[in-house]
Image: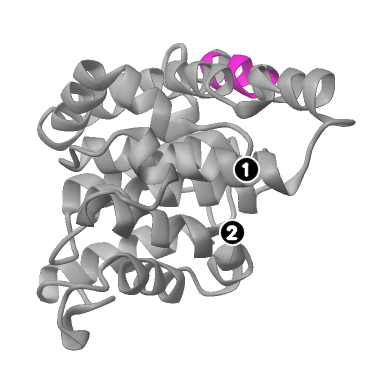
Amino acid sequence: MKSDPLSWLVSLEGVPSAFASARDGVDVLLRDRGLRRTSPELTAESLLRGAHASAVLEGSGSTFDDVRDGAGDEVAMDAVRLSTELLGLAPLLARAPLQALARMHAVVAGGLPESSRGRPRDAESAARLRDIAQVLSAPTDAPALLVAALVHAELATAAPFPSHNGVVARALERLVIVARGVDEKSLVVPEAAHLELRPAYEGRLRGYAADGAAGVHAWLLYAAEAIGVATEASPLRRS
């Protein structure tokens, strides 16, 4: 029997309780505010808010009203295009994560030459993508929210694609949360949390890339905190 490759992360100080609290917050939102009021429109609103926030983090200058009206800049429209296909990729993520990652980039990078869409930049990038896919396919007892946070940071810092790596990384976090049953209707908005917490978000990603185990630890604690903000950003709070 293979050992759990993520067990060391679960043993880091404060990490289990932080993610347990984050999951409790999502469960409370969905149970107390969502069961009788969930609709496809709320899911669409969550995805749109997430796409806008992710695009701003990627450099878009479009407002949310621009995006809602279909008048956003290219980065914003790329993020929206990915959001419209994202939930349909949940089954593919579960059975063939590498294909799902390639498809996500192919969708978001519509402006690139076809030969660059869904393809890693080089051999090293291809290896990093395979590593991320292995994390997604390996059996683990780690919380789903932790796995989502981990692959988000791995993809964002590895930047394996020729463009849109941040948008794909944030979409991947959302997709893992959906595919692993935490928020199947995708009503929390993690991208909005990262935008609201932008200095910490960007700082923790830099630390993840540069500071070894300490950087990973700090990122995970940040990511658990961000889920709390993501629940507050849910359209369920406004419905």
Read off the residue under disc 1.
186
Residue that protrudes farthest toward the bottom in the picture? 115
Q: Residue at x 15, y 40 (%)?
A: 59
Query: In the drawing, does residue 12 fall left or right of residue 114?
Result: right
Query: In the drawing, does residue 24 fall left or right of residue 68?
Result: right
Residue 168 seen: no
For label 2, the crowd category at 10 Å Cα-Cα, with few meaning under 14, some 14 to 19 and many 20 or more, is: many
Residue range highlighted in magenta: 18-24
Label 2–label 1 contact, CB within 8 A = yes
Q: Which quadrant would residue 60 be assigned to in this image?
A: top left
At label 1, the amino acid type is Ser
SS assignment at label 2:
helix
Figure coloring:
one colour
* Quarter occupied by the N terminus: bottom right
Compared with 86, 156 (above or below) is above
Q: Percent position (x, y) of residue 140?
A: 58, 47
Q: Percent position (x, y) of residue 81?
A: 40, 62
Foreground residue, 168 or 135?
168
Q: Residue 50: within the magenta?
A: no
* Quarter occupied by the C terminus: top right
At label 2, the amino acid type is Leu
Q: Residue at x 52, y 45 (%)?
A: 47
SS assignment at label 1:
loop
What secondary structure is the magenta-colored segment mainly? helix
Q: Residue 19: within the magenta?
A: yes
Q: Residue at x 79, y 28 (%)?
A: 34
Q: Percent position (x, y) of residue 102?
A: 35, 73
Q: Residue at x 69, y 18 (%)?
A: 24
Read off the residue under disc 2.
87
Q: Percent position (x, y) of residue 222?
A: 36, 19
Foreground residue, 104 or 156?
104
Separation (CA) of disc 2 from disc 1: 8 Å
